[in-house]
Each structure stands twice: as C-alpha cells, then as structure tokens.
Amino acid sequence: MRFSKYMNEWLYGKDGYYTNFIEIGKGGDFYTSVSSSMFFGGSIANRFIKVFDEGYLSKKTTIVEIGAHKGYMLADIVQFIYTLRPKLLKTLSFAIIEPQIENAKKQLSYFKECFGDEVKLTHYKDLDEVNIDEAFVVANEIFDAFPCEVIKDNKMLYMDEQTPYFHDISDDIKKLCHEYDITRGELGLGYYGFAKKMANAFKRYEFVTFDYGEITQRRDFSLRVYHKHNTYPFFALTDFVKEEEEKPKDVSLESLFKKSDITYDVNFSYLIGEFEKSGAKKHSFQTQLVALVEFGISELLELLAKNSDQNTYEAELNRAKTLLNPTFMGERFKCVIFRKDKS
C-alpha cells in the first residue's frame, strides 16, 4: 500500500493513535507549545485584538480552533481576551472543529470547569458543517499529522505490512513533486482539500497556524516517530539501516505502530502554494519566536509582572522562554498567517 494509507491507518484507523484521547506533555509522547505555556494562547489572543483593532475582523467574529486536543489553547485565548478586552466576550463566539467524540467531551468539560456557563462553545465534526461570515481560526501542529508520501529519486515509498520499499511514483504525486521541486523527502497530502474547505466554511478569515518545518524542501527525510519523549527516525526502525548500532534496541516499527506519534517536517512553500490555490493569501511567514514577539508576548509578561508575585511571574516566564528559545521551539517552529476575504 502507499505510505500515506499506512500513515493514515497508524494515526486515524481503527485504534489509531489519534482516535483515542492521548496525553500531551510530561505524561505523553511529546510536548507542544500549548502544553508549555498559557502565554502561547495569550499571545494569539493579543493577535486577535490587534486584528480587531485594525478593522479586518469585527466584534461578531467566531474564534475557531482546529486540532484542539483538550481545548487548552482556546481556553487560554478566552481567558486573555477577558483580561485584555472583556467587552469583546459579549459579542464573540467560540467553536472547535473536532471529529473525535471523546475529545469533544473533554473539551466541553474543560470549558465548563474554566468558565461555567459564561462562555458557550460550539462543536463541529468537520469544516463541511461550518458556514460562518467572519472567523479567526487557529491551529497548532496539525499539518505535520496529514498523511504524507515519501519521495526518493522519482520513486515513492510503499509498505508491505511493516516492511517499507520504494517503487514507481504515481502520476498525481509526480505532478506535485514537479510543481514544488520535491525530489527527496515527505509530501503531505490533503493540504489543498483542507484549504478549500476553509474557503467554503468562512466568508472571511484570518488563519494563524504553527508547525515545525522549513520554508523550502530539505531534500532529506524527516519522517520520525515520537514515543515517550524519545525520537526515532523512521528508517532507523527498518532494514534500510544496516548498521545495528544505529538501530534502537528497545522498540520496533511493529511495537510503535498506532501506539506513538508519526510525523514529519512541514514544507511551508508547498503548504502556502496549496492555500493560495484555494483563494487565500499569505499574510506573513516567520519563526515562532518572531511571531510571538510581534503578537506581544513581552508586553503580556510585563503585565503579569505588575499584577502577580515574583514566584508566579518567574515560573510563567520560564515556561514562556520554552516557546521562544531559538535552539528549541523558537526557531524550529514556524508561524504562517493566511487571510481570505469575502468573495
């Protein structure tokens, strides 16, 4: 089978990794920016306020999160809007796109715990169900979880159960590789379809999304597996790697299948190109460090310093530094903002 079908089965098939509620953070397989600091969501809230103040979106906007897990990021956004511009909460709406019933239940429970009946949260299973005039849409690390094909010298990866092999590339994948000059590495599938759904779901939107990757193709393989905060290059788990000392001793591809996260670096030139085909425009592209500073994370931390004790401030400052550290999330993660105006 094509590798993309295998990856889809790993993540979204019966008993797939993302079909059950997973832990993120210390008790899970990996950390995210959301699990690292509430100032990630706070900075995005500040970004929305700036967009509102410039007049691109109105007080009737719906703030939508895609890939919300437990709902921490959207809840942080709500909390910071309440702190920074409380009157907006009377007119804004909040929604999550969530296909997994178990996740939706946990999100509703968390919002109830945080806000009682003061904030109404709407759920949609898919973008196909959405018809909203104005939206501020946010997502963190969703495109690295779109099934991909793996390309090598005009061939693509296939799987025979847990055994990988390269074989002839299909015409549809060859066309995309030629269009985006991809000769070696991963090619995420479904980006255009997703962008087209967003264009149909929202008459006007700003979409702020973060992921790890580069603006250009690396021309190397980044496919890897995260398991209990260990990283395993995919091919090190296969017979493509012959040297035994380069292979992990405690795990195998079969033991990790559906029980861990499989992912790859996002090729942002390709992602941007597919969104532009849908009618969206790239508003900006930058590192997470630069984006969060522009969103106003420093000012938010200064506000915390003025209104909390020293211990609380230092603890939150240290968490926020994780988001900005150039050797960790600050440079490794990128932020791209898309806008689509009313037709």
Image: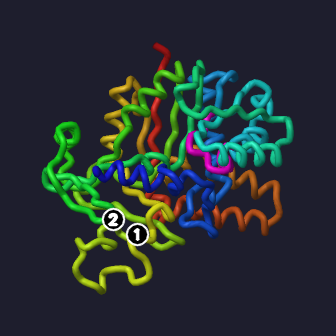
Magenta span:
64-74
Q: Which badge, 1 or 2, comes first in the chain's sequence?
A: 2
The residue where tag 1 is placed is 254
Q: Is residue 329 visible?
A: yes
The residue where tag 2 is placed is 162
- Please name the residue shown 27% across and 54% down the image: 150
In x, y percent, where is residue 167? 16, 54
Give the structural element (helix, strand or loop) at label 1.
Answer: helix
Q: Is residue 281 above or below residue 243?
A: above
**What numbered label is drawn on residue 87?**
none
Q: Is residue 89 above or below residue 153?
A: above
Q: Which kind of residue does numbered mark 1 sit on?
A: Glu
- Please name the residue shown 45% across and 71% down the image: 255
Q: Which kind of residue does numbered mark 2 sit on?
A: Gln
Extreme-top residue of the structure: 343
In x, y percent, where is residue 313? 75, 63
